[in-house]
Amino acid sequence: MSDARLAVAARNRLGECALWCERSGALYWTDIEGCTISRLQGDGQLRAWTLPERVGSFALCAESAPQLLLGLASGIALFELEREALSPIVPVDADQPATRINDGRCDRQGRFVFGMFNAPEQPIGHFYRVHPDLRVERLPLPPAAVGNSIAFSPDGATMYFTDSPTRTIWRVDYGADGSLGRPQEFVRLAGDEGFADGSCVDADGGLWNAQWDGGCVVRYDASGAVSARLTLPVSRPTCPAFGGAELDTLYVTSARGGLDKDALRREPEAGGLFALQPGWRGLPEARFVAAP
């Protein structure tokens, strides 16, 4: 089905990492190449923050004061929204200058898990986890060119991830103590289905995946079977997130970067933020729990 509504004509070069804040009733997302984070409030008011580096992903924080944990291109930092204060920057993969932080999500224990992006699409990046004291730990997962699709089951016992160029989403047992099992293939996309990009999980445990160059968001049940496919008027959706007062609206970011003039004529809304009513509800977003 296709009933996508353009919520914001954002024209993002690379919109990503949509997150709903249930405390403020607002949706946050990043335009990676624009080095910005945007916020859409329930009354339609928009605000954007420009950062000194690209923001690959970020997490809401558990503190009462509005604060985000940022996955900047070069490392991890905390950002106080009201004061627009950024500190500190903890370097990640400093020995790999071609990589930057990419997709990330918090696990159910409040630790931030993220993957790396390498522009030449060579699998030299890794997956990492940020602890409350901002210590960054490399996870024992295979290296990737475009670490993506990070999401956690409602009980937190399963982690999903992908290396996008491989067209395969993996699942791995994930312990509350941080231990990981052996990755198992969850879904393999066909060559004409695009590439697995960002994901989120609904309250029933379904994984929703935005499919770059596939023009859709697909829901997979816990066995990996397709249970819904929502088409969009753009070919490069990037990241879904449930939001709204009842967590029953699926927001989807998208990208216009890399599309030629003909494609942009066909997709004038490319780079926009879309909203759909999929018939499922999401979960409140897990928040990063920083050390006092």
Image (cartoon, grey):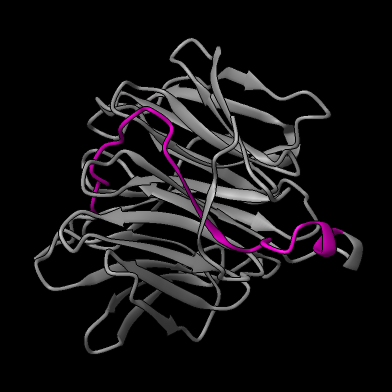
Q: Is residue 110 above or below residue 56?
A: above
Q: Residue 205 location, x and y as percent?
A: 35, 22
48 in the magenta segment: no
Q: Is residue 85 visible?
A: yes
Along the viewing direction, whichever of 260 and 291 lies nearer the viewer: 260
Residue at 53%, 72% (x, y): give it. 74
Q: Residue 100 location, x and y as percent?
A: 60, 64
Q: Is residue 55 above or below residue 204?
A: below
On the rendered structure, is 270 left or right of 78? right
Identify the image quadrant of residue 132: bottom left
Q: Tell me which segment is drawn in magenta.
A: 263-287
Residue at 33%, 76% (x, y): give it. 45
On the rendered structure, is 45 left or right of 31? left
Q: Is residue 184 above or below residue 229?
A: above
Q: Residue 103 location, x and y as percent?
A: 51, 52
Along the viewing direction, whichever of 200 and 253 lies nearer the viewer: 253
Residue at 74%, 33% (x, y): give it. 166
On the rendered structure, is 228 left or right of 80? right
Which quarter of the rendered picture does the N terminus lie within?
top right
